[in-house]
């Protein structure tokens, strides 16, 4: 799967936010990822390709889930999803007939008003 500039920007923003919270330097993170500081910087700046291996290690170090964070991965995950929905309707009367017309449901029912 090819990651986009939007994904890179997301990773960069996460890094900028998390490094302060975790009190970790770029040098320390690069070491954790098995990269030099220059390699790490090139990936975040866009001078080097982002691999899924990098994303997986990077997200693991920052305790985030890549599939709920990176736009491309979120779209890929949702693209295969089927969501089942259900609607219930209560009518004030007795249902006589129900029709389906495309994405519409037509309910025919009879209602007997109360006399006051």
Image (cartoon, rainbow, N blue to C red):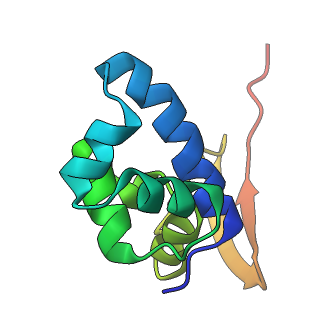
Taking depth in this image into account, of 22 and 38 the one nearest to the observer is: 38
Tell me: residue 98, above or below residue 58. Answer: below
Tell me: residue 45, above or below residue 22. Answer: below
Quadrant for residue 114, please give it.
Answer: top right
Q: Does residue 23 appear to the left or right of 17 in the view shown?
A: left
Q: Does residue 103 appear to the left or right of 77 in the view shown?
A: right
Q: Does residue 81 appear to the left or right of 42 in the view shown?
A: left
Residue 93, position in %: x, y? 65, 46
Quadrant for residue 39, please give it.
Answer: bottom left
Q: Residue at x 76, y 77 (%)?
A: 103
Taking depth in this image into account, of 42 and 53 the one nearest to the observer is: 42
Taking depth in this image into account, of 109 and 52 the one nearest to the observer is: 52
Say whether residue 61 is visible. yes
Query: Tag count in the figure?
Result: 0
Residue 19, position in %: x, y? 40, 28
Tell me: residue 91, above or below residue 95. Answer: above
């Amino acid at each position: 799967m090819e990651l986009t500039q939007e994904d890179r920007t997301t990773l960069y923003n996460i890094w900028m936010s998390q490094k302060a919270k975790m009190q970790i330097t770029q040098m320390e993170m690069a070491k954790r990822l098995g990269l030099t500081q220059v390699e790490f910087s090139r990936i975040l700046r866009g001078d080097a390709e982002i691999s899924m291996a990098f994303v997986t290690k990077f997200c693991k170090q920052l305790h985030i889930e890549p599939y709920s964070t990176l736009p491309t991965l979120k779209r890929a995950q949702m693209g295969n999803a089927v969501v089942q929905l259900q609607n219930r309707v209560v009518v004030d009367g007795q249902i006589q007939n129900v029709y389906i017309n495309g994405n519409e449901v037509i309910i025919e029912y009879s209602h007997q008003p109360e006399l006051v």
